[in-house]
Amino acid sequence: QVELVESGGGLVQAGGSLRLSCAASGRTFSSYHMGWFRQAPGKEREFVAGITASGGSTYYTDSVKGRFTISRDNAKNTVYLQMNSLKAEDTAVYSCAASSRRNYIVKSWAMDYWGKGTLVTVSS
């Protein structure tokens, strides 16, 4: 069992930055591949970024490449999402998720555990 708790969301102006954190409970965090997903009002949940268990590989959806950076600290059981140059269209609830299936790290259906999410609002 892994419990995930996100933090760091809030209101920011367009062009600003936020860093989201996702703290995990349990001793097996370092064996899970982690993802960040987001869901905007009236839209389906979408993949944002993913990182393998070792941190050796990262993945991003095209719309955030060059602006967002995912990282993890296995000693602290935490995964981060640094978001720069934020745009109004980045407004959404951001959730972190853990998966044992590396090949499907971008797929929400492959996630084994989910956090409750944190709201990011970007004002234009």
Image (cartoon, rainbow, N blue to C red):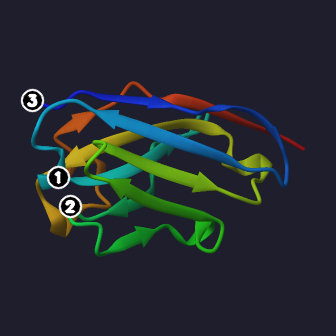
Q: Amino acid at mark 2?
A: Ala
For the C terminus, the image quarter is: top right
Return the residue nearer the eye: 63 or 117.
117
**Neighbour tally class for label 1: few under 14, some 14-19, many 20 plus, Cα within 10 Å:** many
Secondary structure type for disc 2: loop
Dot 2 or dot 3: first in sequence order is 3
List x then y, in percent, for residue 82: 58, 54
Q: Amino acid at mark 1?
A: Ser
Residue 97 vertical placement versus 60 (above, below): above
Mark 3 lies on residue: 1
Above or below, 70 against 65 in this view is above
Query: Mark 3: few, some, or many residues within 10 Å (few <14, many ≥20)?
Result: few
With 27 as the anchor, is 21 left or right in this view? Answer: right
Distance from Cα at disc 2 to Cα at disc 1: 6 Å
Q: Which residue is mark 2?
A: 53
Answer whether labels 2 and 1 touch (C-beta < 8 Å): yes
Residue 30, which numbered label? 1
Q: Which x, y percent locates residue 17?
A: 73, 50
Position of the N terminus by quadrant: top left
Between the C-alphas of marks 2 and 3, the distance is 16 Å
Which of the two discs, 1 and 3, sits closer to the camera? 1
Q: Nearer the viewer, residue 106 or 83?
A: 83
The spot of residue 64 in percent (x, y) is: 60, 65
For image coordinates 46% across by 60% down, the residue present is 70
Q: Earlier in the sequence, mark 1 or mark 3?
A: 3
Q: Tell me whether circle 1 and circle 3 mark residues in contact (CB < 8 Å).
A: no
- Direction from residue 18 to residue 65 in the image, left or right: left
Secondary structure under tag 3 reads loop
Image spot of residue 5 (x, y percent): 37, 27
Determine the residue positioned at 61% across, 67% down. 63
Disc 1, SS: helix
